[in-house]
Amino acid sequence: MSEGTSIDYKYKIVFIRHGQSEWNRTNRFTGWMDVDLTEDGVAEACNAGKLLRTANYHFDAAVTSRLKRAIKTMHFVLEEMDQLWIPEYKSWQLNERHYGALQGRNKAETAQLFGDEQVRIWRRSYDIAPPALEKEDTMFPGHDPRYADIPTEQLPATESLKDTEKRVIAYWEESLVPKIKQGLCLLVAAHGNSLRALVKHIDQISADKIMSVEIPTGVPLVYEFTADLKPVRSYYLQDTK
Ligand SMILES: O=C(O)[C@H](O)COP(=O)(O)O
């Protein structure tokens, strides 16, 4: 995140990764699996709402994925702010990176089986995707009614961060940029890797450098932009060390 420049900004938006999920706690690959928040995750989301309320944020609209850990995080944040009434949008394009056949597996056990380096490549390389799901697999999103409006050929059976970036950035350009340019202050509640993809695009981070960018759960990440949407500054509303 870039801190400390004094250029004036025109637009401001806030990103937040969902609070801790059940599978964050048990260290399992989650991806598009619809896993709930833990109690700690709910507390993180409520704390984020309090931070935003105290800092006097007022959102015009809220945007999230089609997965309950992000949707609920958005609602807990807005409830704390007494802003549950604002328009909200849910897009599959903000979903977590699809983790293919790794979904549901324990990350440490997978490392024991395939080696730390292979798991590091699956988790943090830019353009290498984990093994894909078979289209017949019940975990393939084409079997889930929540994606019935999406052409099957657009639904992933696995994704690299590069694949995730493609659909996240399409949504950014088509849906979010026009709203931001209308002057709407947005809350965007999403996922570790869909947010890494967005931040990579906005801050023009290289494929090498994005490997070491981690986004913590449940902490508001503020981005300020110039009139032509160049990032001026970005910062977390709470110490993340
Ligand atoms: O999908 C998952 O498992 C997590 O949300 C992100 O996991 P990662 O840190 O292994 O990419």
Image (cartoon, rainbow, N blue to C red):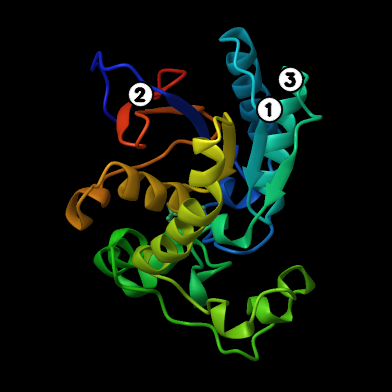
- Nearer to us: label 2 or label 3: 3
The amino acid sitting under disc 1 is: Val
Spatial CA distance of label 2 from label 3 is 24 Å
- Is residue 169 in view? yes
The amino acid sitting under disc 2 is: Lys
Secondary structure under the numbered disc 3 in the rendered image: helix
Residue 241: mark: 2
Q: Quadrant of the C terminus?
A: top left
Mark 1 = which residue?
A: 77
* Residue 3 image offset from top left, x and y in percent: 27, 21
Contact, CB < 8 Å: mark 3 with mark 1? yes
Secondary structure under the numbered disc 1 in the rendered image: helix
Question: In the rendered structure, which disc, 2 or 3, sits on the residue that comes first in sequence?
Answer: 3
Q: Is residue 234 left or right of residue 39?
A: left
Q: Dot 3: within a 10 Å radius of its alpha carbon, few (fewer than 14), some, or many (20 or more) residues?
A: some
Q: In this rendered view, identify the residue nearer to me: 160 or 4.
A: 4
Is 17 drawn above or below residue 109 in the view shown? above
Is 133 drawn above or below residue 96 in the view shown? below
- Residue at figure coordinates x 46%, y 61% from the top left: 170
Is 237 drawn above or below residue 40 in the view shown? above
* Residue 70 image offset from top left, x and y in percent: 64, 45
Q: Quadrant of the N terminus?
A: top left
Spatial CA distance of label 1 from label 2 is 22 Å
Mark 3 = which residue?
A: 80
